[in-house]
């Protein structure tokens, strides 16, 4: 008997692994930053080096866990909305077909452990994993849709993600410019 929930834990483990790899990298960057600005010596008065690193790792992993969880929720909402508009699957078979792609993210999270020393490598692995997952998902779901509906799904998801990312970048740039403009020495 085949259990459809056998890989139900994979999204949680994947998010945790990606959060840990990004967290470990940011801890090393933070410690170097703290040393360069002279804050590290003051922090060492209260915590040992290992305690400080573990404390920072827990904080950064928790932050990345929240970010990746929010991204997963947003991605599922966008995808489910696209499927509502473009899928002709009434029985919901396409939903179970798409869930098997979670293993792609799991292997991407495992591979990200190898790129722990470079933020560019970590981001590249995450983006590449996302693209491979998207291609796999479209391939699996294309048998439940016509070619026009498949193209509509792709265009819809790219449009929504492009708008979302553009809005976030715009807000971050406005925030950055506001902070820089308010600094007295610039």
Image (cartoon, rainbow, N blue to C red):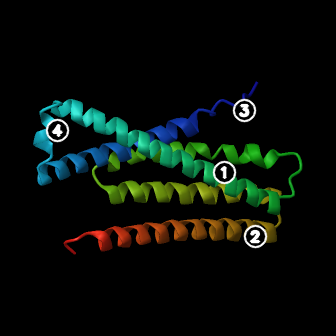
Residue drawn at x 51%, y 54% as measured from the top left: 129
| Residue 7 occupies quadrant | top right
The secondary structure type at the circle numbered 3 is loop
Which residue in the structure is indicated by mark 4?
43
- Mark-to-mark CA distance, 1 and 3: 19 Å
Q: Which residue is mark 2?
A: 152
Of helix, strand and loop, which one carries label 4? Answer: helix
Per the rendering, the mark at residue 30 is: none
The residue under label 3 is: 4
The residue labelled by disc 1 is 76
Q: Nearer the viewer, mark 4 or mark 2?
A: 4
Position of the C terminus by quadrant:
bottom left
* Label pair 4/1, CB-CB below 8 angstroms: no
- For the question of whether residue 110 can be seen, the reply is no
**Closest to the observer, 61 or 11:** 61
* Residue under the image location 16 percent in, 34 percent down: 49
Label located before the other in sequence (3 or 4): 3
Q: Position of residue 26 (x, y in %)?
A: 30, 48
- Asked whether the residues under the numbered discs 3 and 4 touch, taking CB atoms below 8 Å apart as contact, a structural biologist would say no
Residue 131 against residue 105 in the figure, above or below:
below
Query: Residue 173 location, x and y as percent?
Result: 41, 71
């Amino acid at each position: 008997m085949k259990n459809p929930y056998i890989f139900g834990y994979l999204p949680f483990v994947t998010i945790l692994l990606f959060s840990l790899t990004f967290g470990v990298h940011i801890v090393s960057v933070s410690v170097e930053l703290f040393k360069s600005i002279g804050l590290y010596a003051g922090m060492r008065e209260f915590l040992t080096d290992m305690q400080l690193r573990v404390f920072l790792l827990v904080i950064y992993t928790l932050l990345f866990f929240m970010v990746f969880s929010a991204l997963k929720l947003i991605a599922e909402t966008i995808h489910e909305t696209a499927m509502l508009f473009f899928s002709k699957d009434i029985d919901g078979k396409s939903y179970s077909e798409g869930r098997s792609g979670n293993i792609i993210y799991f292997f991407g999270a495992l591979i990200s452990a190898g790129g722990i020393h470079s933020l560019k490598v970590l981001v590249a692995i995450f983006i590449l994993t996302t693209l491979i997952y998207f291609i796999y998902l479209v391939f699996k779901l294309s048998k439940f849709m016509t070619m026009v509906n498949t193209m509509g799904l792709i265009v819809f998801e790219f449009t929504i993600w492009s708008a979302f990312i553009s809005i976030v970048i715009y807000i971050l740039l406005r925030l950055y410019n506001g902070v820089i403009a308010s600094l007295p020495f610039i």
